[in-house]
């Protein structure tokens, strides 16, 4: 067994960083909310800003600003120069202004933070034990449409951030065979249905989701002017023997199957196979753990898996592509195209065997 060698003094420092990680996280949240990061950034060309001036400008006690800056300096989030003026480090800059870090921090704080306390119980029971901090549902998806506004906003921004960027490229792939009828399974807020209807003026799209989500999606679709070509179908994939209406040329599932366990995915893919026209295709877009070029992307996916464990449903995760390939085969489908889209996503196109 190989052990990376690390000096004991460095190892204990790493261990203490983990022991107090929630303190640092909450200090960062506070510095973002109180405007401390913004103010330090604004003063960068004037040689930074002192603790006293931060306190004066933001009408906060020097004590309060001081405890935050102290731990931020130890964590290499801010730097203090010889005049005791603070500036953001590159890490501090990312914590304050990077969009991906921003959605991840808001998602962690608003959706997951309180619930993560119950992770041990979630592992022991296979239930999303942290969800009780948000509401009394079996899965988070039953509650999505009625979450308090700040929590709902953080959830949707996290979800959309990772699919929006690749939608254009994904649409070109989805429409390469000009499908007439597409089912958007896991339609969520109707974003795909709206962009698909804009992309093609002849396609009909059926949004498939839980009733609460469909209500939001239907309103968005009507507002965008596509009510005539976008229909909907209510389903709970966790109910007994879920089925789709027959007749799809394409079934689109984006960031959807990771919301289910392997056994549940098999049930879903079998139902998709049964609903597909003979020459139709199932299109699965996912961020697979074994298809990431950068360690930070893999790390985000691993953290997202823990969100599924403790908050979402207790039994799903971000999967490696190999797991999905096996289930696709078991469901009576064959993988015919395997396409990388954007920086992180893969689309699997599958046909009936
Ligand atoms: C992570 S979102 C994906 C949203 C969208 N496809 C995208 O790419 O951004 C998962 C979607 O699956 C739906 N979903 C989760 N559990 C479900 C269930 N048991 N039955 C039906 N839909 C479900 C949720 O309501 C949500 O809209």
Image (spheres, rainbow, N blue to C red):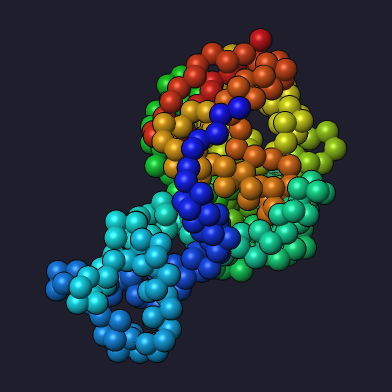
- Residue 99: x percent and y percent? 38, 54
Residue at point 40%, 89% (across, down): 61
- Quick one: 185 or 306, which is closer to the camera? 306
Residue 286 appears in the figure: no
Residue at point 46%, 51% (across, down): 10
Q: Tell which quarter ligand 1 is in.
A: top right
Image position of 54 (left or right of 187): left
Residue at point 51%, 45% (across, down): 300
- Quick one: 173 or 262, which is closer to the camera? 262
Outermost residue, right direction? Answer: 240
Q: How many marks?
A: 0
Q: Quadrant of the C terminus?
A: top right
Q: Quadrant of the N terminus?
A: top right
- Quick one: 335 or 25, which is closer to the camera? 25
Q: Answer with the quarter of the image where residue 144 lies.
A: bottom right
Q: Answer with the quarter of the image where residue 109 lies.
A: bottom right
Residue at point 61%, 32% (across, down): 319
Image position of 124 (left or right of 6): right
- Residue 269: x percent and y percent? 69, 26
Image position of 147 (left or right of 347): right
- Residue 235: x percent and y percent? 73, 42
Image position of 127 (left or right of 69): right
- Quick one: 284 or 223, which is closer to the camera? 284
Outermost residue, left direction? Answer: 46
Q: Is residue 15 above or below residue 255?
A: below
- Residue 166: x percent and y percent? 41, 37
Outermost residue, top direction? Answer: 353
Residue 130 appears in the figure: yes
């Amino acid at each position: 067994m190989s052990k990376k060698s690390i000096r004991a003094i460095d190892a204990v420092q790493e261990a203490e960083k983990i022991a107090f990680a929630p303190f640092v996280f909450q200090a960062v949240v506070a510095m973002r909310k109180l405007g401390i990061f913004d103010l330090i950034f604004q003063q960068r060309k004037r040689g930074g800003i002192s603790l006293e001036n931060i306190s004066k400008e933001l009408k906060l006690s020097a004590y309060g600003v001081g405890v935050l800056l102290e731990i931020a300096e130890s964590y290499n989030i801010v730097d203090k120069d010889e005049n005791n003026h603070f500036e953001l480090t590159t890490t501090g800059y990312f914590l304050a202004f990077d969009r991906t870090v921003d959605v991840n921090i808001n998602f962690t704080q608003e959706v997951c933070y309180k619930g993560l306390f119950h992770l041990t119980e979630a592992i022991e029971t296979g239930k999303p034990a942290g969800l009780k901090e948000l509401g009394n549902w079996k899965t988070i998806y039953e509650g999505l449409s009625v979450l308090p506004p700040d929590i709902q906003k953080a959830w949707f921004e996290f979800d959309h951030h990772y699919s929006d960027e690749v939608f254009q490229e994904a649409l070109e792939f989805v429409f390469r065979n000009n499908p007439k009828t597409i089912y958007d399974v896991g339609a969520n807020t109707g974003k795909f249905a709206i962009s698909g209807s804009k992309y093609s003026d002849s396609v009909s799209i059926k949004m498939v989701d839980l009733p609460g989500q469909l209500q939001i999606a239907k309103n968005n679709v009507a507002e965008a002017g596509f009510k005539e070509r976008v229909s909907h179908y209510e389903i709970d994939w966790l109910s007994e023997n879920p089925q789709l209406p027959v007749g799809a040329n394409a079934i689109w599932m984006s960031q959807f199957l990771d919301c289910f366990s392997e056994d549940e995915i098999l049930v879903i893919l079998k139902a998709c196979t049964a609903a597909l026209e003979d020459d139709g295709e199932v299109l699965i877009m996912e961020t697979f753990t074994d298809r990431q070029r950068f360690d930070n992307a893999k790390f985000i996916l691993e953290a997202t898996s823990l969100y599924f464990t403790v908050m979402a449903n207790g039994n799903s995760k971000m999967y490696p592509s190999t797991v999905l390939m096996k289930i696709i085969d078991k469901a009576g489908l064959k993988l015919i195209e395997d396409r990388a889209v954007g920086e992180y996503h893969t689309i699997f196109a599958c046909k009936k065997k």
